[in-house]
Each structure stands twice: as structure tokens, then as C-alpha cells.
């Protein structure tokens, strides 16, 4: 068991190292910048923000920028973590099956005595390499940085946020996986899943208080709120369960579709 | 039990009927050549046998396991080796890592032995592999777990002539050990060398399955004869002669410049007109020798009819 996951996972180590170093560096930059930002603008920044359209504030998760927690929740977590890193997982997952089919490598894999379900699941499992690396390194860097600049964040809230974001990122990855099984070209699967997820991400905030608000229900970003976790200490466990169920359902859908698929 | 059993197998892609009601068997220990021009539907059958796609009609078994039953087919695949027409591996990894992955799933009791015959550069990344090296790696993974049946789609494409010969010798040795081989090809010379029996596919339909000797016997010999003198094409009109083509060239023109004009040939190759005839002969060889004896021969070639000619009969006749 797990031979394919190990093989795929090993070849994700390099890419994972790059992404982790890049995002770790970004996180540190934000943390280190915050004191300068806070001390030069003071509380004026929130007054300035009040003049922004509500939808824009919501889209970027801006609640307050006067505290380290609020600053990180909007600047680092809402945009970089929930959107960019989310899309990174969708993008990686979208290539898992489609790229193998496109490059005619799937035949070789299917000729092995393994089930199609196992191929899909083990390939998906290889994404846990970057998922675990980012989930361990980023909060560590953020916490250490915040202590170093003397604006320490609550380590428990930080850990809880990252724990809750695991099912969130898995939903992004599983959307990519479904696209990867549906399309025979990796670029198509990637465009389709990134387009859908980006649309849902902004729809959730931009459609609030409109007749189309219901669309936001299917947006993963509705079920993870860094502001609530980091500033208010509210841990939405039910939302995390919703995300977990969605991720499992999407992976199951991908397995069912792949089992029925003619590989041509 | 047949190693492969195909019954009424049909694959309709909607626009193309790639396999149309195919029925044949491959016996255990047999090397079966699956022949046909490109686009005839050979790969479609192979992909169905390997479970990559499901048939739209009929059924097939591999080592007794239904190809549409995934768990049965997985059991069969432990004993099946596969080489696709265009083997492709992850470009970022080395050949050794590929073999290690395959070994961890299906075993590799014959890896070292195979690597001494086919020797791809194992520590190089696949992206730096030539087509021939990819093919060698494909052959090693196909045989490394000591399978009972090997399915190969165009196996010798991409191998240089030396490797092709090694491949033929290798398949012969495996056959002697009881291996069953199902291989497709449109290169006929490689087929007659290794196959016991062939099936000929044309536009999705099976035209014939027969022993390769029978096919060759039926198609006879290809004769090229040059005889002295201007003989008509009816000089070789006897039973079993087909497709006669004769042409006469005036010999001795070079000698005419000497003004000798001597009609009597003192050297068969230089003087007088020479008639060259080519034909396919399927009759009694003694009749042919008697008839040839009535002429003064300049040259005679007797070859086995090329399979291309044989296939022309299957492919050519109904083509309009």
C-alpha cells in the first residue's frame, strides 16, 4: 500500500520546499512590517478603511488593521493563505490525473495491479506533503516573528486557525481533483478549477446582501474566517466539519468518475 | 484455458466503429501477432484487454478474468506484463526510480537479468532518454515480474536493428519457457520472425486468424528470373503463377560499338536480349523447375513472398 503516494510525495518535496520558503518568507515580512505600519499610522488606518466599500473590505477580510491579529487575518491569511495557497492546491490537484492521461503515462500506471480508486486516492494523498509542511512552518514562523517584534499573537488561536484551514485547503484540492478526472488536459482542468474557485471566493463576499447571496453557501471561504479565529477566538468547528464532508464527497466523486472513465 | 479470449468484442466511439464484433483466442504459450495497418483498431483491442476502456459490446477475458471486472482484472495483472505503443514515464525521475516503483507494486525477480539484455541508462532522468532507451525501460518493466502473459503494442518501434534482433531472440527464448505473448504490429517482417499465429485486423474487423506458416504457404514464393532471349510473358504460364510482369532489354548494346554483332552469347550476362520476369508462385515447385529448365537462365531469385504482398490480398481487394 501507499507505493504510489510515496513515489508522488517524494517528487513533491522540492516544490514544497520552494512554496514553503516563499510563503514563510512572506509571512515573516508581514509580521516584521506590522510594528512600523501600526506605529506610523496608528488608529487612523481603520478610519481610512471605513471609507472603503463594504464588499471590498469583506473580500479581503479586512476587519481591523490596528492589531497584529487583524493585520495578519486580512493581509496574510485571507489573501495569501485562503486564496493563493488554496489555488495552489487546486492547481496541483488538477494535474494529478489529467497530466498523466495527457502525456500517456496513465497507461503505465493502470497496467499495474492496482485499482483505479487507489491511483486517485494515493495521488491525492501526495498533496499532504505540501499541506503538512505549510501547516507546520507558516504558523511557527508567524508566532516566532510576532514574539520577536514584541506583538505576540495567541499561539492557540494560530494553531486552531491552521487546523481549521486543513479541510478548507482540501476542498480546494478536491475541486481540482474532480476537474482533473473530468478533463483530459491538465491545463483545462487547472483553468476550470481555478476559475470556479476564484469566482466562488469573490462571490461569497461580493454577493452578500444581494439576491444572489445564496451562491455564497457553496463557497469554501464562507466556512473559514481568520478574523473570527484570530481576533475573537471563535472556533467554528461545525464549519470545519462542513468543509471536511465536502472534501470527502468531492474526492469520492472523483473516484467514481475515474472508475467509469475510458482512458483514451 | 485460453490466455486471451475475445468474444464479439465491439467498441463504438460513436463516430468510429473501432472494433467490430471481434472473436478470437490466444492459447497459452503462444506468440500471437495482431496485425493491421495504422488505424485498424489494434490499440483499441489492447486497451480494452488491459481495462483502460470498456467495450460497448461483447466480452473478453485475460488469463480467465473478465476485463470489465476490475478486481478480477487486477488479479490477472499481477501475471501480465504490458508495453504500450508509446511508453511514457514521469520525465522528472530516473529510470531506476521508475523500476523501483513498479517493483514495489508487482515485483522484480527478473530485473537484473533483463537489464543485462536491455540496458537503459538507469541513473539518468527520463527527460534525457532517447526514444530507444524509453522503449528499453518499457521492455524491462514489462517482463521484470516474470509474467505469464505479455501484451505489447508495437514493441519494436524505436529500437535500432541490433536491439530489434535482441528483442526477437529474447521473445523466442521466453516462448520456449512457456510465455504467452500478444503483440501488435504493422511492421510485417518483425511479426513473421517471432509469431506462431497472426490475426489480421482491417477497419475494425478481423479478416483472418491463422498460423504464420499457413499464411506464408498460401502466399507462396516470390520469383524473379532473368532468361536469355526475348521470351514472351506466356513463357511462364503454368498453374500457380500469379501477377507475371516481364520486360525485355536488348543486351549487348555496348558490344555493338565493337561491331561484333555476334548473336551467340559466349557470356550469358553480356550479349543478346534478356527477359526479366517477376511473379508469385504458389504451385508445385517441380513444375516450375521443369519450366525454368527450358530456358537459359541469367539469374534466378526465389524468396518467401513478403507479408506486405500477403496483406495486399486482405487489404487491397475490397478497397474501392
Image (tube, rainbow, N blue to C red):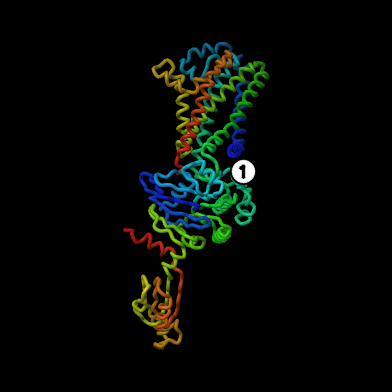
Dot 1 surroundings within 10 Å: few (below 14), some, or many (20 or more)? few
Residue for point 38% across, 72% down: B240
Q: Which residue is mark 1?
A: B104
Q: Chain of mark 1?
A: B
Residue with the most extreme left position: B320
Q: Does residue B25 show up?
A: yes
Q: Position of residue B136 (x, y in %)?
A: 57, 53
Q: Is residue A137 left or right of residue B255?
A: right
Vertical comparison of A185 with B182: above or below: above
Whether A110 is drawn above or below A219: the answer is below
Q: Secondary structure at mark 1?
A: helix
Q: In the picture, which quadrant includes the N terminus of chain A?
A: top right
The image shows residue B59 at horizontal and vertical percentages of 43, 47
Which quarter of the figure has residue B104?
A: top right
* Residue B282 appears left or right of A133: left
| Quadrant in the picture for residue A261 | top left
Image spot of residue A58 (x, y percent): 49, 17
Is residue A80 visible in the rendered image? The answer is: no
Query: Which residue reaches farthest right?
Result: A148
Rendered-image quadrant of the C terminus of chain A = top left
Residues B126 and A254: in front is A254
Question: Which residue is pictured at 56% across the width and 46% down the height?
Answer: B78
- Count of numbered badges drawn on the protein: 1
Where residue B90 appears, x then y in whole percent?
Answer: 56, 43
Residue at 37 percent of width and 71 percent of height? B242
Query: Which sits in the foreground, B154 or B94?
Result: B154
Front residue of B296/A232: it is: B296
Amino acid at each position: 500500500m501507499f507505493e504510489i503516494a510515496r513515489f508522488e510525495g517524494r517528487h513533491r518535496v522540492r516544490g514544497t520546499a520552494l512554496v514553503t520558503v516563499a510563503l514563510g518568507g512572506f509571512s515573516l515580512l508581514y509580521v516584521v512590517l506590522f510594528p512600523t505600519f501600526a506605529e506610523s499610522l496608528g488608529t487612523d488606518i481603520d478610519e481610512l478603511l471605513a471609507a472603503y466599500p463594504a464588499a471590498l473590505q469583506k473580500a479581503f477580510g479586512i476587519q481591523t488593521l490596528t492589531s497584529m491579529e487583524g493585520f495578519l487575518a486580512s493581509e496574510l491569511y485571507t489573501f495569501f493563505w485562503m486564496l493563493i495557497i488554496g489555488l495552489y492546491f487546486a492547481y496541483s490537484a488538477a494535474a494529478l490525473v489529467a497530466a498523466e492521461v495527457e502525456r500517456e503515462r496513465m497507461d503505465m500506471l493502470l497496467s499495474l495491479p492496482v485499482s483505479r480508486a487507489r491511483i486517485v486516492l494515493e495521488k491525492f494523498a501526495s498533496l499532504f506533503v505540501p499541506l503538512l509542511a505549510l501547516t507546520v512552518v507558516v504558523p511557527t514562523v508567524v508566532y516566532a516573528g510576532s514574539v520577536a517584534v514584541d506583538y505576540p499573537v495567541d499561539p492557540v488561536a494560530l494553531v486552531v486557525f491552521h487546523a481549521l484551514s486543513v479541510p478548507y485547503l482540501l476542498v480546494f484540492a478536491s475541486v481540482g481533483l474532480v476537474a482533473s478526472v473530468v478533463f483530459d488536459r491538465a491545463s483545462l482542468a487547472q483553468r476550470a478549477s481555478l476559475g470556479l474557485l476564484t469566482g466562488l471566493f469573490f462571490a461569497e463576499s461580493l454577493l452578500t446582501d444581494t439576491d444572489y447571496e445564496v451562491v455564497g453557501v457553496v463557497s469554501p471561504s464562507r466556512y473559514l474566517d481568520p478574523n473570527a479565529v484570530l481576533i475573537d477566538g471563535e472556533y467554528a468547528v461545525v464549519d470545519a466539519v462542513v468543509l471536511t464532508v465536502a472534501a470527502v464527497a468531492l474526492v469520492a466523486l472523483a473516484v467514481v468518475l475515474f472508475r467509469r472513465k475510458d482512458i483514451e | 484455458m485460453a490466455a486471451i479470449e475475445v468474444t464479439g468484442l465491439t467498441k463504438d466511439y460513436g463516430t468510429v466503429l473501432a472494433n467490430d464484433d471481434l472473436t478470437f483466442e490466444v492459447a497459452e504459450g503462444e506468440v500471437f501477432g495482431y496485425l493491421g495497418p495504422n488505424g485498424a483498431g489494434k490499440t483499441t483491442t489492447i486497451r480494452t484487454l488491459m481495462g483502460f476502456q470498456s467495450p460497448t459490446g461483447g466480452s473478453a477475458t485475460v488469463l480467465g478474468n473478465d476485463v470489465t471486472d476490475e478486481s478480477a482484472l487486477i488479479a490477472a495483472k499481477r501475471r501480465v506484463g504490458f508495453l504500450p505503443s508509446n511508453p511514457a514515464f514521469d520525465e522528472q525521475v530516473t529510470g531506476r526510480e521508475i523500476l523501483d516503483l513498479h517493483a514495489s507494486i508487482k515485483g522484480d525477480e527478473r530485473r537484473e537479468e533483463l537489464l543485462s539484455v536491455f540496458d537503459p541508462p538507469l541513473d539518468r532522468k527520463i527527460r534525457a532518454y532517447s526514444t530507444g532507451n524509453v522503449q528499453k525501460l518499457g521492455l524491462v518493466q514489462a517482463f521484470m515480474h516474470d509474467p505469464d502473459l505479455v501484451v505489447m503494442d508495437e514493441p519494436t518501434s524505436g529500437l535500432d536493428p541490433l536491439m530489434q534482433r535482441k528483442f526477437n531472440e529474447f521473445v523466442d527464448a521466453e516462448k520456449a519457457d512457456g510465455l504467452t505473448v500478444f503483440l501488435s504490429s504493422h511492421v510485417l517482417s518483425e511479426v513473421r520472425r517471432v509469431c506462431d499465429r497472426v490475426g489480421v485486423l482491417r477497419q475494425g474487423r478481423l479478416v483472418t486468424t491463422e498460423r504464420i506458416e499457413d499464411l506464408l504457404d498460401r502466399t507462396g514464393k516470390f520469383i524473379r528470373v532473368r532468361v536469355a532471349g526475348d521470351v514472351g510473358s506466356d513463357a511462364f504460364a503454368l498453374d500457380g503463377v500469379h501477377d507475371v510482369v516481364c520486360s525485355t532489354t536488348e543486351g549487348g548494346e555496348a558490344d555493338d560499338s565493337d561491331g561484333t554483332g555476334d548473336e551467340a552469347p559466349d557470356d550469358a550476362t553480356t550479349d543478346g536480349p534478356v527477359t526479366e520476369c517477376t511473379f508469385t508462385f504458389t504451385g508445385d515447385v517441380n513444375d516450375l523447375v521443369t519450366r525454368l529448365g527450358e530456358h537459359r537462365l541469367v539469374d534466378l531469385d526465389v524468396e518467401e513472398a513478403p507479408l506486405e504482398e500477403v496483406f495486399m490480398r486482405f487489404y487491397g481487394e475490397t478497397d474501392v
